[in-house]
Amino acid sequence: MSLVRRQSLTFRLTLLFAAASTVVLLILGQIVVRSVEGHFEEQDMAELGGKLELTRHLLERVRSAGEWDGLPQLLDDALIGHHGMAIAVRGPDGQMLFAAHGVSFTPPLIERAGPAGRPQVWRSDDNVDFRGIVGEARTGMANAPPAFVAVAIDISHHRSFMDAFMRTLWLVVLAASLATGLLGWFVARRGLAPLRDMRRKAGEVSAQRLDQRLSVEAVPVELAELAESLNDMLARLEESFRRLSDFSSDLAHELRTPVSNLMTQTQVALSRNRTAEAYRDVLESNAEEFERLSRMISDMLFLAKADNGLIVPGRESFDLADEVAALFDFYGALAEENGVSLRQAGSAPLMADRLMLRRAIGNLLSNALRYTPAGGEIVATARLVHDDAGATTARLSIENTGEPIPPAHLARLFDRFYRVDAARRSSGDGAGLGLAITRSIARAHGGDIEGRAGVQSNVFEMWIPVSKSSGQ
């Protein structure tokens, strides 16, 4: 079984092509054989029918019992010039009146009653093949029962021809099968050439050459979809490698800043003797950097678990509006200090992990506060949405006024360490993991999140499934 799986596609196509051709040739050969045999049978039946009618005509001329004695001579004369033809006549009383010399008629043939019988084929005692028929023949005697006439013809030459024909046919079929197999191999090799080209080009792809693409126009129509799928896969791989490279660079950059701060402050503190109060200040500053590193590592561990499906949300009943209100109270002082107003609307009860969603909503509000200018507004709207299939989702949209995010950045907003404004990398506004964590939390609940730009605002909308159609 393993051998069959390891056979090449060219071999399989060649084998199938040869097998199909052989089957077709065999069927065609059987049709030809049957046609030839049918032709020979028709010829034989024409001669047999003619002799049967001639014998009937001779019997009709028998008017008395005395004329029976001359019948054998008439029948012998009728067979002159017809080599291989034989006639047998059985009288009304069952007595054999005439039989050709050297021919043994089968009892079923000569004893068959009725006006005419189907042809029979048999082999005589001296291994000669015959085909014969039997029919009734009335005499010219009044009220006399009919006699039975059997007419046979030697078909040995037909059999010899058919045997030679069959041998030739099998040799032709064998040679044609080999020839079609060879032709099939050549055609398969030529036909699969685009696949070999695709394999060669795929072999050229590496981590440094992910920009390679297969030419869709150069392959047959049947392989165009495969080429497009491979190109799409390469595009996804290229994008994934690019993001991974960017992520590695960003991670190194984010870790380098606090580590560099720690090293610098520690080296400065150790450069000379200082007071206990100065050492305390250095330790407090280091503690802040350690706290930043700890948060970053914790966030990275959370994202790693989310990527591997290890986050299992708890389930409790609550309303998204309540969590938004609690977070508005938490961020109220900061919003008032920045001159940003907070407004809440709607309600969306659901069953989910309260702490995880509170963290996700907090990330969204923190991000909105960071990019909302003074005098701006943040609006959080919670609602339940029912689709045509009967499914219900809880949706929370947080819209903040401010400069719209450029479309080029929308697709990467949820990438790790990605910031629209690169100048903020060292501003201490966070590690750039908040939106990535929010998306992981939404997806862990079976939902998702998207960002879009308005006229003079930005909107982040998160949705969580509440229920599916129950068939009610």
Image: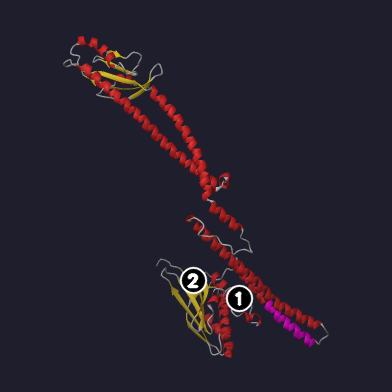
Which residue ends up furthest to the right in the rendered image?
Answer: 273
Q: Nearer the viewer, residue 48 or 381?
A: 48
x and y percent of residue 391 in the render? Answer: 44, 70
Mark 2 residue crowding within 10 angstroms, few (<14) / some (14–19) / many (20+)? many
Q: Residue at x 50, y 58 (%)?
A: 224
Q: Which residue is mark 2?
A: 465
Specify whether 211 is left or right of 180: right
Q: Which mark is residue 418?
A: 1
Mark number displayed over residue 345: none
| Amino acid at pointer 2 | Pro
Q: CA distance from mark 2 to mark 1?
A: 28 Å
Q: Amino acid at mark 1?
A: Tyr
Asked whether 141 falls inside the magenta stretch, the response is no
Foreground label between 2 and 1: 1
Mark 2 and mark 1 residues within 8 Å of each other at the beta carbon: no
In front of the other: 261 or 155:
155
First reached walking from the N terminus: tag 2 or tag 1? 1
Residue 90, position as x, y percentages in the image: 27, 16
- Mark 1, other Cα within 10 Å: few <14 / some 14–19 / many ≥20: many
**Residue 89 found in image quarter:** top left
Residue 286 lies in the magenta stretch: yes
* Place of residue 410 in the rendered image (x, y in percent of width and height, measured from the top left): 54, 76
Query: Which residue is rendered at x = 53% and y = 60% of the image?
Result: 215
Give the secondary structure at mark 2: strand
Residue range of the region highlighted in magenta in the rendering: 276-293
- For image coordinates 75% across by 84% down, the residue present is 282
In the image, residue 463 sits, relative to residue 130, either above or below, namely below
Name above or below for residue 399 compared with residue 36.
below
Residue in the picture at 73% in, 78% down: 260
- 28 or 291, which is in the foreground? 28
| Helix, strand or loop for disc 1 | loop
